[in-house]
């Protein structure tokens, strides 16, 4: 194993190399109602995000019972798929062998997709806690199925000390009542902060702008990225730096594209011997960044997906829905 680069130097290389001007241009990803607002991440915000501990997301289910426009986990486009408990147990065992991993991760997020769709969600919860006895663990849900959950689920949540985070979508959902329900089962609960704010202070959601041609400059994309390295993904035996790298596959099926990851886009969990390797992954541009058109990254108010390419892609030439 070669020596890991100095963390501070790696960070400086990541954020200061190859700066380009912000165009602010609106283009092919503007939706019909024109309500998208360009999103810009300052260099200072990027540095701050990378200095903080990362989250680690796990898709308990790829699909969802909601259809949020532009979902950055691609759930509206995903085929139904549940986390396989046997494979997940092996991945957790490998993860737990990495020295210091529980203190390194800010929080493990059991999510998706909608995690409560998984018929064995209680098993997922117990397995996660068994391998990571000291980690902060949260289950992120839209809450729509919460009232139907049985004792097995609530006992697992309570006994394993899992925090429930509800995504506060603008739906007719009585979130305070759901928080009380959780409290009645001895489960800590709150509202998740998976929304960002527009310049006028309204809650808004990211709209990706992926360039299927893969012709973006990876360094520039990574420098402007609000996701990469902040929300690591654990999927298919690997650690990925972001949602795009880990979960983009449904785009290819839906829009007949060939967006593809390369070996350097992720780490095989079983091969990781030090959290320094994860630090290097999350702070460095990687091949998938060539698909991210950060000049067209935007935010918009929540809406139901029309499953159109415009919700995820910026360069819409030659897109043929599958
Ligand atoms: S591929 Fe790179 S630029 Fe795109 S979301 Fe991931 S880390 Fe960010």
Image (cartoon, helix red, strand yellow):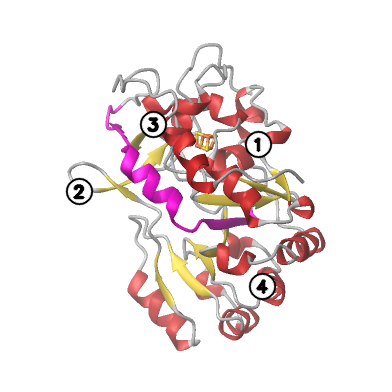
The answer as to whether callout 1 falls within 8 Å of ligand 1 is yes
Q: Residue 36, image x and y in percent?
A: 30, 32
Q: Callout 4: helix, strand or loop?
A: loop
Closer to viewer: mark 3 or mark 1: 1
- Residue 214 in sight from this viewpoint: yes
> Distance from label 4 to label 1 (Cα)?
25 Å
> Distance from label 3 to label 4 (Cα)?
35 Å
Q: Residue 270, image x and y in percent?
A: 79, 54
The residue to which callout 3 is attached is 297
The residue to which callout 1 is attached is 265
Which labelled disc corresponds to residue 201? 2
> Distance from label 2 to label 1 (Cα)?
34 Å
Q: Earlier in the sequence, mark 3 or mark 1?
A: 1
Magenta span covers which residues? Answer: 33-62
The residue to which callout 4 is attached is 132
Q: Nearer the viewer, residue 300 or 88?
A: 88
In the image: residue 102, left or right of residue 40: right
Taking the spot 37% from the left edge, 50% from the top edge, the residue there is 48
Q: Callout 3: helix, strand or loop?
A: loop
253, above or below 240, in the image: above
Q: Earlier in the sequence, mark 4 or mark 1?
A: 4
110, above or below 70, in the image: below
Pointer 4 and pointer 1: residues touching (CB < 8 Å)?
Answer: no
Q: Earlier in the sequence, mark 3 or mark 2?
A: 2
Residue 78 location, quadrant:
top right
Q: Earlier in the sequence, mark 2 or mark 4?
A: 4
Which labelled disc corresponds to residue 33? none
């Amino acid at each position: 194993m070669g020596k890991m680069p100095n963390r501070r130097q790696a960070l400086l290389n990541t954020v200061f190399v190859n700066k380009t001007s912000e165009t602010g241009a609106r283009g092919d990803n503007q939706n019909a109602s024109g309500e998208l607002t360009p999103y810009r991440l300052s260099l200072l915000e990027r540095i701050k995000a990378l200095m903080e501990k990362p989250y680690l997301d796990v898709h308990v289910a790829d699909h969802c019972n909601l259809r949020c426009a532009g979902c950055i986990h691609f759930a509206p486009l995903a085929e139904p798929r549940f986390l396989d408990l046997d494979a997940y147990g092996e991945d957790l065992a490998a993860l737990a062998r990495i020295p210091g991993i529980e203190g390194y991760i800010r929080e493990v997020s059991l999510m998706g997709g909608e995690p409560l769709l998984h018929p064995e969600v209680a098993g997922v919860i117990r397995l996660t806690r068994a391998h990571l006895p000291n980690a902060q663990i949260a289950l992120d849900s839209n809450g729509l199925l919460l009232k139907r959950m049985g004792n097995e689920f609530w006992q697992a949540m309570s006994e394993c000390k899992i925090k429930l985070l509800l995504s506060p979508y603008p739906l007719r959902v009585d979130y305070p009542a759901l928080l009380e329900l959780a409290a009645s089962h001895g489960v800590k609960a709150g509202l998740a902060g998976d929304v960002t704010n527009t310049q006028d202070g309204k809650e808004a959601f990211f709209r990706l702008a992926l360039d299927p041609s893969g012709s973006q400059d990876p360094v520039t994309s990574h420098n402007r990225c609000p996701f990469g390295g902040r929300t690591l993904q654990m999927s298919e035996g690997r650690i990925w730096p972001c949602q795009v790298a880990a979960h983009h596959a449904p785009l290819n099926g839906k829009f007949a594209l060939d967006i593809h990851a390369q070996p350097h886009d992720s780490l095989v969990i079983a091969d990781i011997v030090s959290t320094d390797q994860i630090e290097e992954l999350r702070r460095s541009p990687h091949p998938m960044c060539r698909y991210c058109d950060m000049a067209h990254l935007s935010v918009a108010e929540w809406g139901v997906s029309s499953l159109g390419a415009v919700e995820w892609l910026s360069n819409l030439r030659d897109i043929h829905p599958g």
